[in-house]
Amino acid sequence: MNGPEEEVVLVDEHDRETGRAEKLEAHRQGHLHRAISVLVHDGESRQLLQKRQHGKYHSQGQWSNACCSHPRPGETPMDAAHRRLQEEMGFDCPLNFLFSTLYRQDVGNGLIEHELVHVFAGHYRGAVAPDPAEADGYQWLDFELLCADVARTPEAYSAWLRIYLETHAREIRAACTG
């Protein structure tokens, strides 16, 4: 379950745990918390994108990376990444740590994403079966076309994906073409 009532792990800027908070309240207050994101490529520089389900509590209907979420208390970021990839997109694949980043962004509906995110990359070429409660669809998009489209229509993409592409494009490009 990944509903708004779930707890998130609060952290400081060095990823040291400082407490826990109910997920929706952490986003209302803008508390810094631990998060994960997974970027999946097909080995031919295409990125897997999901269209965030319209019932989500923020960033509804926007295109985003394969999956993103929060580790549960006591769960490692890597374990959370595998769990959420399976839950959101219906598959799992080997993942490698890519980078960590800290950002704070107003995402609408009175909510603030203030996250220290562990970003993972994986290679996958198989069936994708998104959970309809999580995603309204998916697509594979060439990395360079993705970057161009984000520059042209940023409002169509999640804030965190835009931030990753702005601040870590070199690492992502290397991961999705290697």
Image (cartoon, rainbow, N blue to C red):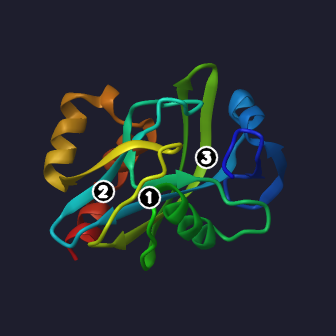
Q: Residue at x 72, y 69 (%)?
A: 75
Q: Give above or below for 60 relative to 177.
A: above
Q: Residues within 10 Å of mark 1 (few under 14, many from 20)?
A: many
Sequence-wise, the earlier of marks 1 and 3 is 1
What type is the residue that disc 1 sits on? Met
Q: Which residue is mark 1?
A: 89
Q: Residue at x 22, y 34 (%)?
A: 151
Give left or right: position of 67 versus 10.
left
- Closest to the camera, between mark 1 and mark 2, is 1
Residue 25 lies, in percent from the top left, at 77, 33
Residue 115 numbered mark, or none: 3
Q: Are marks 1 and 2 in contact (CB under 8 Å)?
A: yes
Secondary structure, mark 3, is: strand
Q: CA distance from mark 1 to mark 2?
A: 10 Å
Q: Residues within 10 Å of mark 3 (few under 14, many from 20)?
A: many
Sequence-wise, the earlier of marks 1 and 2 is 2
Residue 127 lies, in percent from the top left, at 32, 67
Sequence-wise, the earlier of marks 3 and 2 is 2
Q: Are marks 1 and 3 in contact (CB under 8 Å)?
A: no
Residue 48 numbered mark, or none: 2
Residue 71 lies, in percent from the top left, at 67, 60
Quadrant of the rendered structure where residue 46 is? bottom left
Q: Residue at x 18, y 64 (%)?
A: 45
What type is the residue that disc 2 sits on? Leu
Residue 146 numbered mark, or none: none
Give left or right: position of 26 versus 70.
right
Q: Residues within 10 Å of mark 2 (few under 14, many from 20)?
A: many
Q: CA distance from mark 3 to mark 2?
A: 22 Å
What type is the residue that disc 3 sits on? Glu
Secondary structure, mark 2, is: strand
